[in-house]
Image (tube, helix red, strand yellow):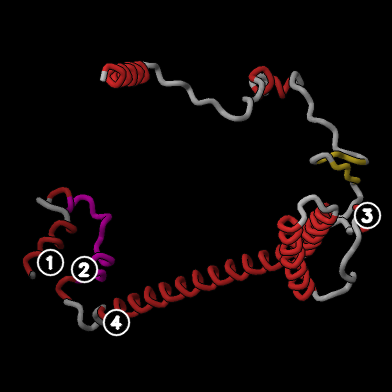
Amino acid sequence: MFALLFEVFKSSSQASKMANAEPTNVSSAFPLPPTNYYSLHTDENIRRGRVLRPPNPVADSYAMFGTTYQMDDSIIRPLESQGIRRLYPQNCDRRRELRKLNHSLLVNFLDLLDLLVQCPESPRRAEKVDDLSLLFIHIHHLLNEFRPHQARETLRVMMELQKRQRIETADRFQKHLEKVMEILDQALQMLPENEDLDSKLLVPIDEMENMDVTSGDDSKNEACSPLDRMMCDIVDAM
C-alpha cells in the first residue's frame, strides 16, 4: 500500500514539473541560411559590386546524389551507359513490357520467400535480391521514358483548358454585347418622334435670330431683357 501511494505521489510530482516547465522552441530540421550572406545583398551593395558573385555555370560535368553526369548527357540515360544489362529490346511496346516486368517481379519475390522459408542460408538469396533490384531498375527506367510523353500531354491539356476558357470568355462577352445592344434599341424605340414633341416647350429660334441685340438704348430703358421676357412667355404658356 505504501509503495502504491509512493508511485502515485511520484507520478503527480513529475506531471506538475512538466506542466510548470517552459515550452521548448521547435527548430527547423535544416540549418538556417547564413545571415552575413543574405543581409549583404542589398540594392546599394549590388549597385556598388560588394556582394559575392554567383558561381559560374557548369561546363563539363557535375555530381548529383553521388553520381557524375556530363553536360551533354541525355535527360534519360540509356541503360547501357549506366552499366546495366537490358532485359527488353530497344524498340518495344512499353505497356506490354511493363506488364511482363511486373509479373516477373512477383514471381521472383515469391521465389525469394520460398528460399527464405526452406533454406535461408542459400547463396541463391543474394541472386534473387539482385534480380529484384534489376527488375525495379528496368521498371523505373520504362516509367522515366514516359516523362516526355507526359510533359507533352500535360502541355496539351493546359493549352486546351486555356483555349476553352478564352472561348467561354468571348461567348460571355458576346452575350453581354448583344444584351446591351438590345437595351439600346429598346431605348431608341421608346424615344418620341419630333412631331410628338410639345411645341410650347420649344424655344422660338426665329425670334431670337431676328432680335436686334445692337439696340442698346432701348434695352437700357426696359425693365427686363428680351431673353427674360421670352422665358416668362414660355412659362406662362405652360
List the residue tagged with mark 3: 81
The reply to whether the C-beta atoms of the residues labelled 2 and 3 are less than 8 Å apart is: no
Helix, strand, or loop for circle 3? helix
In the displayed structure image, the side of residue 116 where residue 86 appears, left or right: right
Instruction: Determine the image quadrant of residue 29.
Output: top right
Count how many numbered circles sit on residues in the image: 4
Q: Is residue 75 visible?
A: no
The reply to whether the C-beta atoms of the residues labelled 1 and 3 are less than 8 Å apart is: no
Q: Which quadrant is the N terminus positioned in?
A: top left
Q: Is residue 178 visible?
A: yes
In the displayed structure image, the side of residue 89 where residue 128 appears, left or right: left
Amino acid type assigned to the residue bearing label 3 in the image: Ser
State how far apart marks 2 and 1 are (Cα): 8 Å
Q: Camera-side residue: 208 or 55? A: 55
Which sits earlier in the primary sequence, circle 1 or circle 3? Answer: 3
Helix, strand, or loop for circle 4? helix
Which sits earlier in the primary sequence, circle 3 or circle 4? Answer: 3
List the residue tagged with mark 2: 203
List the residue tagged with mark 4: 189
Does the stretch in magenta take in 218?
A: yes
Amino acid type assigned to the residue bearing label 2 in the image: Val
Give the residue at x 34% y 79%: 185
Amino acid type assigned to the residue bearing label 1 in the image: Ile
Residue 53 locus on image (x, y percent):
79, 26
Residue segment shown in magenta: 202-219
